[in-house]
Amino acid sequence: MIDLFLVREATSKDEEAVKNIVKRSGLEVDLLPDIESFLIAETESKELFGVIGLEKHGRSGLLRALVLNSAESTSERLLRFFDQVIAYAKKCKLEELYLTSNEESFFFQVFGFSTISREELSVDIKQNRLFRENSSNRVIMRRQLNF
């Protein structure tokens, strides 16, 4: 049996559901990007199983707040969801994707991300409040998108 799900752009109607799933994960809701920056993964029965923010800054994208509903998530869904996020970024004609996390992640390396220094951030991404205000030792990863 094929496990079908839809990845779509969030709308204002999704704001409460997105905030709830992010809150349950322990992430800070006040620092989230606008709801229109989120992509939602949901089952055929409209069960939300994942969200991710994709902020667009010029030709660069910044992935934020990847959260999965553990009751609805499987590793296969996660891989397919993230693959569709990459495809969406390419469709938006983004040239590169960035993300930041507490530690280097093999999962993101599988999808072509590699660790970079803060100095290697694009000018557009450096302007994001995550990098202006945050002087922590978070890992920064980047993936070039080929068309």
Image (cartoon, rainbow, N blue to C red):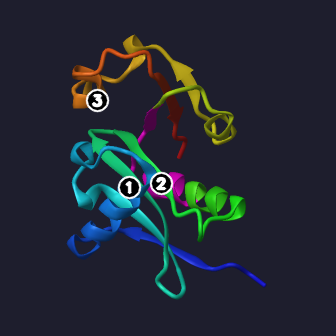
Residue 73 percent location from the top left of the image? 62, 65
Q: Which residues are magenta?
A: 84-100
- For marks 3 and 1, give the one nearer the viewer: 1
Q: Is residue 92 visible?
A: no
Seen at 68% across and 34% down, the residue is 106
Residue marked by disc 2: 67
Q: Is residue 53 above or below residue 46?
A: above
Q: Is residue 94 in the magenta section? A: yes
Disc 1 + disc 2, Cβ < 8 Å: yes
Q: What's the mark number on residue 22?
A: 1
Seen at 41% across and 47% down, the residue is 26
Mark 1 surroundings: few (<14), some (14-19) or many (≥20) residues within 10 A: many
Nearer-N-terminus badge (2/3) = 2
Quarter of the image holding residue 128?
A: top left
Nearer-N-terminus badge (1/2) = 1
Seen at 38% across and 55% down, the residue is 22
Residue marked by disc 3: 130
